[in-house]
Image: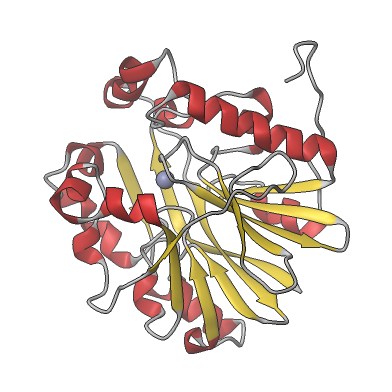
């Protein structure tokens, strides 16, 4: 089994989105008053070349995101900027790796934010899995008001709603095994969105966490610093602590979507170094 990091263009956002300041609504509104942009950050999608079939986790950015500069939605128009060429989308990049998108058995989405579902159009023949709650949140006009782009979903898009079960893996208590071998596992990592998932791959003694936007970087996960968009402070913090506990329990390579170090961390199998504080976190 091999995991590939596929960079689908880049994005820049406000610092107050990466690292939340203050609490609750004030933290979330902070994005709109912050004048400080991050550097251009990568947007990774992931391909798991698994003996039971190829699994893609997140589909990254699509070139249609360049239209956001004309969006009427204040977040899309003013608070995020994308760079992406057509040949940087996930479809052409998979072909360059010798994989036809139609050979992808399953696509799992950590959540439906626009830089994670932007490459869906490349997978009309694949089984697409999305957490049931996330699908509900992202649909229709209510979804569009929340900054999702359900109007950009391909006409054929009819994902399988994923329900997690009350089983445990490490500190996680809501999971779903995605392979018969049990080595690819969706786990609930709520916070960034209420029904956000991460996908864990266990291979040769290392636990890889494809973390989506559970945090923007490994350092923020380890520090327990929640982002600027999570709706609920306590839920987001609890998820970061579970991820940290997982990394304390077993050698863990942590792979967030927008961490500039994710790709190198994956190729060097660099595990997270965890220090547990005196309060046990
Ligand atoms: Zn997101």
Number of marks drawn: 0
Q: Residue at x 60, y 38 (%)?
A: 217
Q: Which residue, as the protein is rendered here, is positioned at the far front?
A: 166
In the rendered image, which quarter is residue 74 located in?
Answer: top left
Q: Residue at x 37, y 50 (%)?
A: 133
Residue 242 drawn at (x, y percent): 66, 34
Which image quadrant: the N terminus? bottom right
Q: Residue at x 18, y 63 (%)?
A: 151
162 relative to 125, above or below: above
35 relative to 165, above or below: above
75 relative to 113, above or below: above
In the rendered image, which quarter is residue 214 located in?
Answer: top right
Task: Give 229 or 176, whichever is nearer the viewer.
Answer: 176
In what quadrant does ligand 1 lie? top left
Task: Give 43 or 146, whichever is nearer the viewer.
Answer: 146
107 relative to 130, above or below: below
Which image quadrant: the C terminus? top right
- Judge whether residue 242 can be spotted in this image: yes
Residue 92 drawn at (x, y percent): 47, 80
Q: Residue at x 60, y 52 (%)?
A: 175
Q: Which residue, as the protein is rendered here, is positioned at the far right?
A: 205
């Amino acid at each position: 089994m091999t995991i590939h990091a596929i960079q689908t263009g880049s994005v820049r956002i406000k610092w107050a989105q990466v690292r939340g300041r203050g609490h609750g609504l004030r933290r979330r509104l902070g994005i709109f008053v912050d004048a400080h942009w991050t550097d251009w950050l990568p947007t990774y999608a992931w391909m798991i070349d698994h003996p039971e079939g190829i699994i893609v986790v997140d589909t990254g950015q699509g070139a249609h995101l360049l239209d956001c500069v004309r969006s009427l939605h204040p977040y899309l128009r003013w608070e995020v900027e994308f760079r992406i060429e057509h040949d940087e989308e996930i479809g052409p990049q998979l072909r360059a790796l010798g994989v036809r998108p139609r050979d992808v058995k399953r696509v799992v989405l950590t959540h439906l934010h626009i830089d994670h579902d932007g490459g869906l159009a490349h997978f009309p023949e694949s089984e697409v899995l999305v957490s049931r709650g996330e699908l509900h949140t992202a649909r229709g006009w209510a979804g569009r008001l929340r900054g999702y782009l359900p109007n950009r979903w391909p006409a054929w898009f009819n994902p399988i709603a994923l329900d997690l079960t009350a089983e445990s893996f490490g500190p996680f208590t809501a999971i779903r095994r995605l392979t018969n071998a049990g080595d690819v596992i969706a786990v609930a990592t709520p916070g960034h969105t209420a029904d956000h998932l991460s996908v864990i791959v266990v291979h040769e003694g290392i636990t890889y966490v494809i973390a989506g936007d559970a945090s923007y970087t490994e350092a923020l996960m380890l520090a327990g610093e929640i982002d600027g968009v999570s709706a609920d402070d306590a839920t987001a913090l609890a998820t970061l602590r579970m991820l940290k506990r997982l990394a304390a329990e077993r050698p863990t390579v942590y792979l967030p979507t927008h961490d500039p170090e994710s790709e190198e961390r994956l190729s060097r199998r660099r595990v997270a170094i965890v220090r547990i504080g005196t309060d046990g976190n």
